[in-house]
């Protein structure tokens, strides 16, 4: 067996899917894992929330717990990429600090920022069908989630299905721009 310590170092690529709840990020991630040419890990923020024990959290402690969970999630993604793993993450940048935290942690050249859009009436229809989200959550997130205004690539899941969005992202990867959206956001050029 080869010594793994001799494996060449590399920075993993992060495909960062950003959109409101019910916008289709997880469906796109599932399709990406199916079609990408190299192994990727899908790390959705919802999975980190689901890992928490079922111990009741007092209402006055919930915001702190959620903040710590999101910060831990960002660091887990950064750690996986720093170890050379490719990651598909899906997240909701509905608070400015979340983007700022990711900008501080991720290698900006190795992030493909994908805007996942969907009009509000369709988001609300999907929320009702899912039944596992608070009513109106997407509507509350929508004014904030795309406020930073810059992406490497964008898709609208109300007009394009998840498989087609994933194919567009895969085809885009070899042609990533310089500077990337994350590089522009990091330097204040956006």
Image (tube, rainbow, N blue to C red):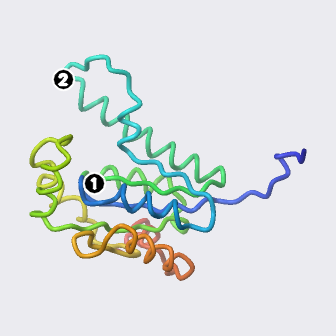
Q: Is residue 73 left or right of residue 58?
A: right
> Residue 15 in the image: x percent, y percent?
47, 63
Up/down of 24 relative to 155, above or below: above
**What kind of element bears circle 2?**
helix
Quadrant of the frame with the N terminus: top right
Q: Quadrant of residue 30?
A: bottom left
Q: How many marks?
A: 2
Which residue is pictured at 43% across the width and 59% down the height? 29
Name the residue that disc number 1 marks: 96
The image's mark for residue 167 is: none
Residue nearest the viewer, comparing 172 with 81: 172
Name the residue that disc number 2 marks: 60
Which residue is pictured at 74% across the width and 57% down the height? 9
Judged from this view, the residue extending furthest toward the right is 1
Residue nearest the viewer, comparing 52 with 152: 52
Q: Reading the chain from its start, which is encountered first: label 1 or label 2?
A: 2
> Residue 149 in the image: x percent, y percent?
27, 71
> Residue 98 in the image: x percent, y percent?
34, 50
> Residue 186 in the image: x percent, y percent?
43, 65
Circle 1 residues within 10 Å: few <14, some 14–19, many ≥20: few
Quadrant of the frame with the C terminus: bottom left
Up/down of 55 relative to 15, above or below: above
Which residue is pictured at 49% across the width and 79% down the height? 172
Circle 2 residues within 10 Å: few <14, some 14–19, many ≥20: few
């Amino acid at each position: 067996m080869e010594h793994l310590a001799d494996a060449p170092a590399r920075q993993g690529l992060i495909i960062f899917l950003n959109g409101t709840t019910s916008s289709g990020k997880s469906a796109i991630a599932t399709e990406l894992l199916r079609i990408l040419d190299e192994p990727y890990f899908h790390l959705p923020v919802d999975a980190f929330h689901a890992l928490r024990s079922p111990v009741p959290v007092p209402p006055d402690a919930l915001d702190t717990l959620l903040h710590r969970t999101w910060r831990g999630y960002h660091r887990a993604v950064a750690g996986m990429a720093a170890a050379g793993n490719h990651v598909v993450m899906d997240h909701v940048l509905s608070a400015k600090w979340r983007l700022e935290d990711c900008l501080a942690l991720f290698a900006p050249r190795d992030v493909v920022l994908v805007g996942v859009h969907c009009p509000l009436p369709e988001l609300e229809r999907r929320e009702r069908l899912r039944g596992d989200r608070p009513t109106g959550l997407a509507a509350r997130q929508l004014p904030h989630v795309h406020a930073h205004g810059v992406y490497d690539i964008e898709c609208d899941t109300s007009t394009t299905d998840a498989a087609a969005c994933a194919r567009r992202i895969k085809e885009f990867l070899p042609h990533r721009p310089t500077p990337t959206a994350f590089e522009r956001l990091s330097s204040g050029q956006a």
